[in-house]
Amino acid sequence: MTAARMDGHIKVGCDDAIARAKKVWDRVVADATTGCWNWTGEFDISGYGRFYTSGRRIGAHRLSFELQNGPIPFWAEIDHLCHNPACINPDHLEAVSRRENCRRRRRRATRTHCPQGHEYLSETTMIHATTKSRVCLICNRERCRADYWRRKGINPETSVGAPLGNLDVLKTNLSHG
């Protein structure tokens, strides 16, 4: 039996559940600092993970929520409590009404600092081209560096030959030295 979408829900067959679970968890990297389970597979234009099964595209966060909690009610949207669209940790996901999801989104838009505490200033913030949401450039730079070293298979904290400290400080010292 294969997975299929029925009435907006994912029907998981016994014979392919193990293979599907392995396929899903091979595309997840846990972030120890945030508790997020970040999807590393394909993404849609808004930054949400996409999972293909039986020729159908499913939101990775929706799949994770349904595997943990059962079918999503027809009236519900899945809200990321962590505000990270790549996260598929079911503990960070909640089924809410469209109205509640929009209310939470508006409330987040009035914040003055990113979740890590960096102030949203014109020089440290950009507007995402497709989602029109604010992106902290400091956090984005740190995330890109961590992704780079993860893809290389190197832990920069413990590896010999990895860059030490902040690259901006290193560049400053090189230009003045």
Image (spheres, rainbow, N blue to C red):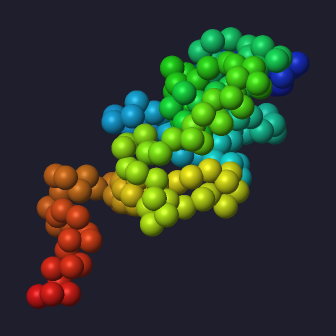
Which residue is the extreme one toward the right? Answer: 7
Q: Based on the displayed image, in which of its 4 quarters is residue 160 positioned?
A: bottom left
Q: Position of residue 163 (x, y in %)?
A: 21, 66
- Residue 15 visible in the current orientation: no
10 or 13: which is nearer to us?
10
Q: Quadrant of the N terminus?
A: top right
Residue at coordinates 49% horizontally, 59% vertically from top-left? 125
Q: Position of residue 144 (x, y in %)?
A: 42, 59
14 or 93: which is nearer to us?
93
Residue at coordinates 45% horizontally, 33% vertically from top-left? 36
Residue at coordinates 63% horizontally, 12% vertically from top-left? 69
Q: Based on the displayed image, in which of its 4 quarters is residue 21 positioned?
A: top right
121 or 90: which is nearer to us?
121
As drawn, 117 above or below 93: below
As drawn, 41 above or below 173: above
- Residue 163 visible in the current orientation: yes
